[in-house]
Amino acid sequence: MPTEILVRTQGIVKRYGRTQAINGIEVEIPKGIVVGLVGPNGSGKSTFLKLLAGVLRPDAGTVTINGLPVGIKTKARVSYQPEIDCLYDWMTVQQVLDFTATLVPDWRPKRADEMIAFLNLDRGVKVRHLSKGMRARLKLVVTLSRDADLFLLDEPLSGIDPPSRLRIIKTLISGYEAGRHTIILSTHEVAETEGIFERIIFLDKGQIKVDADAQELRSQHGRSIQGLFEEVYQ
């Protein structure tokens, strides 16, 4: 049975003034895997995810999700968590959930309830009173409680305390349905996340340096993805 391609990019380019953030990336990502998008700050990870999410448009090339050009129809099947915190400080945790449920038709309240319990979030606490780690947990609930085909997570562990990092990783594992959901997670915190990746894409200056099956990459080089990361970007 042929592999069903969920994400396809062909020669995409994105510039910010004279800076070329994405330079001719061509990639195909099948449905139902977890992809690690790794690289140092400024390598193009966030821009690449924004192009897939439809937040940005490429200056050249094409992006398709499920065979459709990125647009209104694809946005309905993509759940995107930006690195920037977009939560409203005046809302309680429960109000954030209720508000999000009015915005997305594929909201899964049962999944949200499970994650709220597992992540130890208090529904009555206002966002402004949450620690950075707890805000990161809430962002994850908002993102993963949808019944989307593609989940895009931009640096979900950046600057987060170790207990929250562990909870976030466990939540990703528990909610992932192999063969159905595709997760692309960008990070430069490779050591803690590499165990969940099935495929690894190394970005550098807007170009792909490595794109390979995670286990095969470890076997071929006899070291961890973290070790390879340090070698590639030394």
Image (spheres, grey):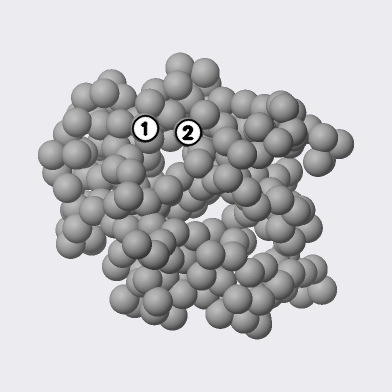
Q: Would you say residue 71 is visible in this rendering? A: no
Residue drawn at point x = 46 percent, y = 75 percent: 64
Residue that lies at the very extreme toward the left in this rendered image = 110
Q: Which residue is mark 1?
A: 173
- Look at the numbered discs 2 and 1 and tell me whether their residues touch, using CB distance below 8 Å: yes
Residue located at (61% from left, 39% from top): 216
Nearer to me, 186 or 1: 1
- Decide which of 125, 136 is in the foreground and name it: 136
Q: Amino acid at mark 2?
A: Ile
Query: For the image shown, how many numbered marks are present on the structure?
Result: 2
User: How far from the left and from the top, in percent, is residue 138?
Assistant: 34, 36
The residues tagged by marks 2 and 1 sit, at their Cα atoms, a distance apart of 7 Å
Label 2: which residue?
196
Amino acid bearing label 1: Ile
- Expressed as whole percent of the image width and height from the top left, the position of residue 90 reads 31, 42
In the rendered image, the quadrant that contains the N terminus is bottom left
Comes first in the chain, label 2 or label 1: 1
Q: Is residue 11 above or below residue 147?
A: below
Residue 52 point in image, percent of width and height:
49, 66
* Element under disc 1: helix
As drawn, the label of residue 156 is none
Rendering coords of residue 104 (x, y %): 23, 60
**Which of the 4 image quarters holds residue 166?**
top left
Residue at disc 2, secondary structure: helix
Q: Is residue 112 left or right of residue 139?
A: left
Mark 2 neighbour class, 10 Å CA radius: few under 14, some 14 to 19, many 20 or more: some
The residue closer to the viewer here, 95 or 108, is 108
Which quadrant, please, contains the C terminus? top right
